[in-house]
């Protein structure tokens, strides 16, 4: 798969440091500890994203190239209580500038811990994606932490709620990094976005 060819391009702490805005980009977002780095690593068979992070490092947008025209983007995690307010404000503006102005952005992957779904942050991201008509894939990570039946129930509940509140540009998928659950399905969605 295309995703297996991911390699680091650069980090941007300001939006003007992003690579040229051409081709196709899919961005990954999630609250801190949701499992975003693990999901990125699992989907790319690589260790692209650090799974243990210090708050200071989370303020960077990281770009990974798949081919000349296609990139995965690791957006900064959100929710570290320890991060000072000024930094949170900077983060918000930074992210907002990227999300609002990036023409090459074709899809958003929003990672949520299946046990703590639809936080304020998640709702904000879904709202924003909806306003921008950006197709979104919600990965309910750590599905392995629930019994199979319970994870299916959660999926149905969350699917219904997301569809009602955010429409059908959002799809929802169970995901587990250690079990590689949902990997083929997520790859299929990414391929659709990257090769419209
Ligand atoms: P991030 O802050 O969103 O990038 O989260 P990480 O990927 O660093 O994951 C946070 C913690 O959850 C780490 O201890 C991971 O090993 C664990 N984790 C992430 N995804 C999964 C998963 O699918 N299943 C299980 N059991 N643990 C996971």
Image (tube, helix red, strand yellow):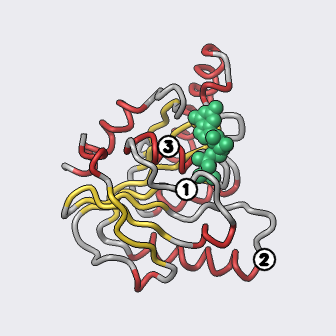
Residue 85: give x, y in percent of width and height.
Answer: 77, 78
Please say whether residue 161 is visible from this viewpoint.
no
Q: Which residue is mark 2?
A: 84
Classify residue 149 by image quadrant: top right
The residue depicted at 53 percent of the width and 72 percent of the height is 60
Label 3 element class: helix
| Gap in angstroms between the C-alphas marked 2 and 1 | 22 Å
Whole-percent x and y of residue 13? 51, 79
| Vertical order, 13 against 181 (above or below) | below
Residue at position x 33%, y 58% in the image = 7
Q: Earlier in the sequence, mark 2 or mark 3?
A: 3
- The local crowd at label 2, few if under 14, some if 14 to 19, many if 20 or more residues have their Cα within 10 Å, is few
Q: Place residue 143 in its image quadrant.
A: top right
Tag count in the figure? 3
Q: What residue is shown with label 1? A: 50
Q: Which SS class for mark 1?
A: loop
Q: Nearer the viewer, mark 2 or mark 1?
A: 1
Label 2, label 3: how many angstroms apart (C-alpha)? Answer: 27 Å
Q: CA distance from mark 3 to mark 1?
A: 11 Å
Which numbered dot is residue 39? 3
98 relative to 158 in the view: left or right:
left
């Amino acid at each position: 798969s295309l995703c297996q060819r991911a390699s680091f391009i650069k980090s941007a702490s300001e939006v003007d440091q992003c690579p040229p805005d051409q081709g196709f980009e899919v961005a990954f977002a999630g609250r801190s500890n949701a499992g975003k780095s693990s999901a990125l690593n699992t989907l790319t068979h690589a260790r692209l994203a650090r799974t243990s992070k210090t708050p200071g490092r989370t303020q960077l947008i990281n770009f990974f190239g798949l081919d000349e025209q296609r990139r995965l983007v690791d957006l900064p995690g959100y929710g570290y209580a320890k991060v000072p307010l000024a930094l949170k404000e900077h983060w918000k503006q930074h992210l907002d500038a990227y999300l609002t102005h990036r023409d090459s952005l074709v899809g958003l992957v929003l990672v949520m811990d299946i046990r703590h779904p639809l936080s304020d942050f998640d709702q904000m991201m879904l709202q924003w994606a909806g306003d921008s008509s950006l197709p979104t894939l919600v990965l309910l990570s750590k599905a392995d932490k629930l019994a199979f039946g319970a994870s299916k129930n959660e999926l149905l509940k969350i699917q219904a709620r997301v569809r009602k509140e955010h429409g059908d540009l959002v799809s929802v998928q169970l995901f587990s990094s250690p079990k590689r659950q949902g990997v083929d399905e997520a790859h299929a969605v990414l391929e659709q976005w990257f090769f419209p």
